[in-house]
Amino acid sequence: MNTLHYIINDIQPFDKTAPINTVQKAFNQLTYSHIPVVHENDFIGSISETDVHCFDADKVIGDFQYALEPFHVKDNTNWLDILEAFALHQSNIMPVLNTQNKYLGYYELSDIMDLFNDTPFLSEAGGIIVVEKGIRDYSFSEMCQIIESNDAKVLGIFISKMSNDLMQATIKIGHTGMNAIVQTFRRYSYNVVSNHEEDKFLEDLKMRSNYLDKYLNM
């Protein structure tokens, strides 16, 4: 996906010679977590709203250059890497530089999230299944094969959790008839974490549990 047309310049970056009180007033009127700082169009870093309100209003940004955060992306960065950068730095604004490290503008988090919303993973109708397996044991090709062998299409798959040598994969499947897929994952030693109304295995367990409870209470 081409993200270049999402670069905006609604808010001009501050030069490092800008007074802190001017930056404080700007943040009072904005919803951004950071504002980029440049000097002669060279990107220096971004100043955060949290920090700027702790600084002496009579000084300039350059006096606190140590506090500027250097995070940024390049104009050829993939949109998924851009989204990751937003998450890593807990920012809703992302400076964009060219290959010469010249400041071009910035991305807004909401615009990049809209790109994700337009992907088939979210926009296409289908069902979600979450499976779990050992980190050393899972395979993307195997998971896709399980789904496609049941005449379904994979609309998207990503690792949504990793802990204690286990991984969880969230998979978007192009139809909602999940029972055969769920059973196949279990035959391949995947733990199906998500709940599915069509899961006959769980229905059978529930029926047997109810029968046992009834028997024990006789």
Image: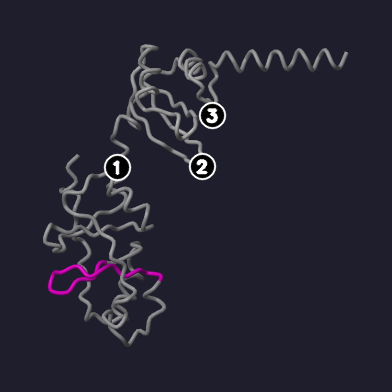
The span picked out in magenta is 36-50
The verdict on residue 212 being magenta is: no
Residue tagged by mark 1? 114
Residue 96 location (% of width, % of height): 20, 57
Q: Nearer the viewer, residue 11 or 148?
A: 148
Mark 1–mark 2 CB contact (< 8 Å):
no
Q: Mark 2 or mark 3, which is nearer the start of the sequence?
A: 2
Q: Residue furthest right?
A: 218
- Distance CA(mark 3)–CA(mark 2): 14 Å
- Determine whether the residue tagged by mark 1 lies in a helix, strand or loop: helix
Whole-percent x, y for residue 193 in the image: 54, 29
Query: Of 105 and 75, which appears nearest the observer?
Result: 75
Q: Residue under circle 2?
A: 163
- The type of residue carrying mark 2 is Ser
Q: Which residue type carries mark 3?
A: Val
The quarter in which the C terminus is drawn is: top right
